[in-house]
Image (cartoon, rainbow, N blue to C red):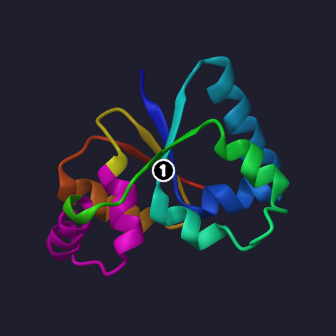
């Protein structure tokens, strides 16, 4: 079964309780679709040192957060070069995607370029 890959825009939508995003996530939950992201995406959305982003904290319990280690960092740089883009966080989002996954993103054009350059057959969905 495919997963939903989440970029920062997807997490912001969750935090704001965006109706469309909440509906997508409810469907994913009903169908036992895995949720996945890279750890550095959290740096784009987490702002409260005291953990008062309760909605986001609860939501993260159900998300597979992949580490960004040296190997992924290098792979992200290579992917940026191939795609002709410049955002390493977006590159890690593309790298955690697998064939058949769907990527929920606020930047569909750049993510699409990265996914194509990575040779992954994933669908990019704007949020």
- In the rendered structure, the answer to whether residue 54 lies left or right of residue 32 reads right
- In the rendered structure, the answer to whether residue 45 lies left or right of residue 97 reads right
What are the residue bounds of the magenta stretch? 72-95
- In the rendered structure, the answer to whether residue 51 lies left or right of residue 80 reads right
- Magenta highlight: main SS: helix
Task: Identify the residue at horizontal 77%, vertical 71% (top origin).
Answer: 48
Task: Identify the residue at horizontal 47%, vertical 65% (top origin).
Answer: 40
Q: Is residue 90 magenta?
A: yes
Q: Is residue 44 magenta?
A: no
83 up-or-down from 72: above or below: below
Determine if residue 4 is in view: yes
The residue wearing badge 1 is: 37
In-front residue for pair 121/8? 8
Task: Identify the residue at horizontal 51%, vertical 63% (top origin).
Answer: 41
At which x and y percent is residue 98? 31, 39
At which x and y percent is residue 113? 29, 64
In-front residue for pair 113/12? 12
Q: Circle 1 — which element? A: strand
At which x and y percent is residue 26? 73, 30
Residue occupying the far front of the picture? 50
């Amino acid at each position: 079964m495919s997963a939903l890959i989440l970029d920062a825009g997807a997490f912001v939508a969750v935090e704001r309780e965006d109706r469309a995003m909440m509906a997508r996530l409810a469907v994913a939950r009903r169908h036992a679709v895995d949720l996945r992201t890279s750890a550095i995406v959290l740096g784009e959305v987490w702002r409260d040192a005291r953990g008062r982003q309760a909605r986001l904290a609860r939501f993260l319990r159900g998300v597979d957060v992949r580490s960004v280690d040296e190997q992924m960092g290098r792979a992200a740089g290579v992917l940026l070069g191939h795609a002709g883009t410049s955002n390493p966080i977006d590159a890690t989002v593309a790298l955690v995607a697998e064939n058949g996954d769907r990527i929920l993103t606020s930047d569909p054009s750049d993510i699409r370029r990265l996914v194509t350059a990575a040779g992954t057959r994933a669908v990019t969905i704007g949020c």
